[in-house]
């Protein structure tokens, strides 16, 4: 723990049911924390009642273990993450805490959509991957493949994973991070049968691939597990190929922290200095019935001590740490102090939320970059407490759950007083909100799922103006669609969404994606995939109103004029302004209404429309049932993008509006006799068809209690 060179912070990530939790069991058994006979069957890190009942991982869970490698002990801080797409936010947060990841891939199913998603999440956080191909015993026993056919399948999986690494990794790491059988960054095995092999292990022990097939086909799994124990092979691979905090923080800090790398705290984090200024990030918050709130944090520099006072940067508060502990699944082992480079549990930070930056009381550091999930919440439900006396308890729970899981967005509709919860899918809302509320004895009434739309524009507006209430200030704007490539770069996280501080760093990326140099140099704010640009020349006192203009721009983005939905993919340009010379006459009460009026007017004059969310999905179905599936997709306004067939099974790639997806899973099961299933590849937003645009806008306005008539643009 006190020697960062001998620490590995890792997680296990994969598509649902590819064997992450079973693999975790094996690693725990190897570390002597679980009986070898129970490994793979206990699912030790799925200790929540809901997880056991549903048979899936819902919450990421932490455990620390010791592994001996070449005569030295290493500390491995491991996080087991969920595989279901609805709980992908937990994977994103876990990736911030770790430096390396074991990507688990099923030998039978191959690389699935969620495999691609977790690889994207890892590479976005500069987390280095290694690959474990699981369920190899099924290729021998069930599919009865020859060694040549098995090899073909392995090569296909490895090539697909490497294509994804090349596609999503930063250019400077991509080629070095490719996985490779020869160097041992790929291992094969069966987590359920407790064995694994890799080329370095085969060379060291003399065990051959033929031995593996013989043992497996003869059912001698226990003997094989003794000759090639899974934990030995996989943890050796982790220690040999995944970086220690000392190595990883050299290149990860510049990606996840946008402060000055030459500052004292910047240098401390890059060198993982245990004696430096304290800097850590909260990646998970869970209530513990005995201890209160437990915050999982990654320490990048400094040392955390019991009883220490710390500052929560986002909350502008100081709190005292009551306990510092190391994780052991559902239990925690308390310590007096823990230095930089570790992933730990802290009790006492009652105001912390996932993504919060924590530092010492005397340090004013730049916060870490927000932990942003790849997908946005696109399914919303309205909930109410049946009994008014339960309302305070419900509000307290919602406040708590939005701190634990930032991919759950909780809003109060001011007009109707209803509580709106938005998540990644119906299961996400049920598992994290509806069911826990019922378990607490709070009866709720929830609406049918509501779809979250975005407002955007189709063309450039003429110049529009907005006058302050006192008539002394006037602002001139235009509104137009944002360049496709710039929008895509923001979606992919290549362009950070924030008030622009280091414009020099941003200009090359914006120009690379098609924005002119003149505009790129003058970007004021990037917010929710919209860009605000100052295109004025020599306006007096304008810099004194910058903060207010940005605030007004953000308020319009949050509540578009068509249906009070969030705006997206817009470029708003401030063209000119005339301001009163006396600061008292150009305060927030004057500037903000004027700017909002102008931008709203600009949107209404730019042929505004809605963007609707679409899910790009993969449907696996037997060949003979493909006709019924195609018909179902097209009946839901869906488009078939691609169809491939392999060994009697078809894979359909389709794009379906989220509004048409409700009930799709049960319908698919019904038309395929339970043989078809689908998985989410991506969520995208596209302009809504013109024929249903008006009807959709009116239904949203009606639901929100807004006047039916859409505001008309005001002539300047």
Image: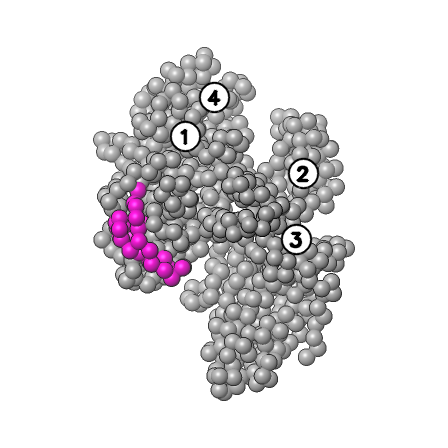
Specify start and end residues of the magenta stretch as a single range.
Answer: 298-325
Q: For the residue carrying disc 1, how many other residues have a C-alpha within 10 Å: few (<14), some (14-19), or many (20+)?
A: many
**Quarter of image, res 609:** bottom right
In-front residue for pair 352/240: 352
User: Which of the two discs, 2 and 4, labels the residue nearer the N terminus?
Assistant: 4
* 107 displayed left or right of 95: right
Whether residue 630 sits left or right of residue 211 in the image: it is: right
Tell whether position 307 is magenta. Answer: yes
Choose the circle earlier in sequence order: 3 or 1. 1
Q: How far apart are marks 1 and 4 (CA)?
A: 22 Å
Q: What residue is disc 4 on?
A: 137
**Where is residue 689 drawn, in percent x and y?**
73, 54
Q: Which residue is drawn at 43% across and 50% down?
A: 354
Provide residue 67's location: percent of width, then percent of height.
Answer: 29, 32
Residue at mark 3 to residue at mark 4: CA–CA distance: 44 Å
Q: What element carries label 3?
A: strand
| Residue identifier under label 1 | 44
Q: Earlier in the sequence, mark 3 or mark 4?
A: 4
């Amino acid at each position: 723990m006190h020697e960062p060179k001998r620490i590995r912070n890792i997680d296990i990530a994969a598509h649902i049911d590819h064997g992450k939790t079973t693999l975790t069991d094996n690693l725990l058994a190897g570390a002597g924390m679980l009986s070898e006979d129970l490994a793979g069957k206990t699912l030790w890190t799925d200790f929540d009642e809901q997880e056991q009942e549903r048979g899936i991982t819902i919450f990421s869970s932490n455990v620390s273990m010791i592994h001996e490698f070449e005569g030295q002990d290493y500390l491995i801080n491991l996080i087991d993450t969920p595989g279901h797409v609805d709980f992908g936010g937990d994977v994103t947060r876990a990736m911030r805490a770790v430096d390396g990841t074991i990507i688990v891939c099923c030998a039978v199913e191959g690389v699935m959509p969620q495999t691609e998603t977790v690889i994207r999440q890892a590479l976005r956080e500069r987390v280095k991957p290694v690959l474990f191909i699981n369920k190899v015993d099924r290729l021998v026993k069930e599919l009865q493949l020859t060694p040549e056919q098995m090899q073909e399948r392995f090569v296909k999986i490895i090539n697909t994973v490497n294509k994804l690494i090349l596609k999503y990794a930063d250019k400077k790491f991509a080629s070095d991070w490719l996985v490779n059988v020869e160097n041992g960054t790929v291992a094969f095995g069966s987590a359920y049968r407790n064995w694994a092999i890799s080329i370095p292990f085969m060379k060291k022990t003399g065990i051959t691939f033929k031995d593996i097939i013989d043992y497996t086909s003869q059912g001698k799994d226990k003997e094989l597990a003794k000759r090639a124990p899974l934990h030995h092979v996989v943890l050796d691979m982790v220690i040999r190929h995944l970086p220690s905090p000392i190595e990883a923080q050299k290149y990860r800090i510049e990606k996840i922290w946008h402060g000055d790398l030459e500052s004292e705290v910047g240098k401390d984090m890059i060198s993982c200095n245990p004696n430096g200024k304290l800097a850590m990030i909260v990646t998970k918050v869970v209530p513990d019935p005995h201890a209160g709130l437990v915050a999982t944090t990654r320490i990048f520099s400094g040392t955390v001590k019991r009883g220490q006072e710390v500052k929560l940067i986002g909350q502008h508060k100081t709190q005292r740490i009551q306990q510092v502990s190391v994780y052991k699944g559902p239990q925690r082992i308390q310590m007096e102090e823990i230095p930089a480079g570790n992933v730990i549990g802290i009790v006492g930070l009652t105001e912390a939320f996932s993504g919060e930056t924590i530092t010492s009381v005397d340090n004013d550091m730049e916060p870490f970059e927000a932990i942003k999930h790849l997908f946005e919440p696109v399914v919303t439900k309205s909930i109410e407490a049946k009994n008014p006396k339960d309302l305070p308890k419900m509000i307290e729970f919602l406040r708590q759950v939005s701190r634990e899981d930032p991919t759950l967005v909780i809003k109060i509709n001011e007009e109707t007083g209803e509580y709106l919860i938005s998540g990644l899918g119906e299961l996400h809302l049920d598992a994290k909100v509806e069911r826990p509320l019922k378990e607490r004895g709070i009866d709720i009434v929830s609406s049918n799922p509501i779809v979250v739309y975005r407002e955007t524009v189709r063309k450039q507006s003429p110049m529009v103006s907005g006058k302050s209430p006192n008539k002394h200030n006037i602002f001139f704007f235009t509104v137009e669609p944002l360049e496709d490539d710039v929008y895509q770069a923001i979606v992919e996280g290549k362009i950070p969404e924030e008030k622009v501080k280091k414009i020099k760093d941003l200009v090359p990326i914006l120009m690379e994606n098609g924005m002119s140099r003149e505009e790129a140099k003058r970007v004021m704010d990037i917010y929710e995939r919209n860009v605000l640009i100052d295109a004025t020349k020599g306006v007096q006192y304008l810099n004194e109103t910058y903060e207010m203009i940005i605030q007004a721009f953000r308020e319009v983005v949050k509540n578009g004029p068509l249906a009070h939905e969030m705006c997206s993919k817009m470029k708003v340009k401030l063209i000119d302004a005339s301001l009163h010379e006396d600061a008292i006459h150009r305060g927030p009460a004057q500037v903000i209404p004027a700017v909002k009026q102008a931008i709203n007017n600009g949107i209404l004059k730019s042929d505004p429309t809605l963007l609707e969310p679409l899910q790009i999905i993969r449907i696996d179905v037997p060949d003979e049932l493909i006709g019924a599936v195609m018909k179902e997709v097209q009946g839901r306004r869906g488009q078939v993008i691609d169809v491939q067939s392999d060994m009697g099974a078809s894979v359909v790639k389709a794009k379906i509006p989220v509004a048409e997806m409700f009930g799709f899973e049960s319908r698919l099961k019904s038309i395929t006799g339970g043989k078809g299933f689908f998985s989410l590849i991506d969520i995208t937003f596209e302009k809504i068809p013109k024929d249903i645009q008006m009807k959709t806008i009116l239904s949203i306005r009606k639901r929100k209690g807004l006047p039916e008539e859409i505001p008309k643009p005001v002539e300047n």
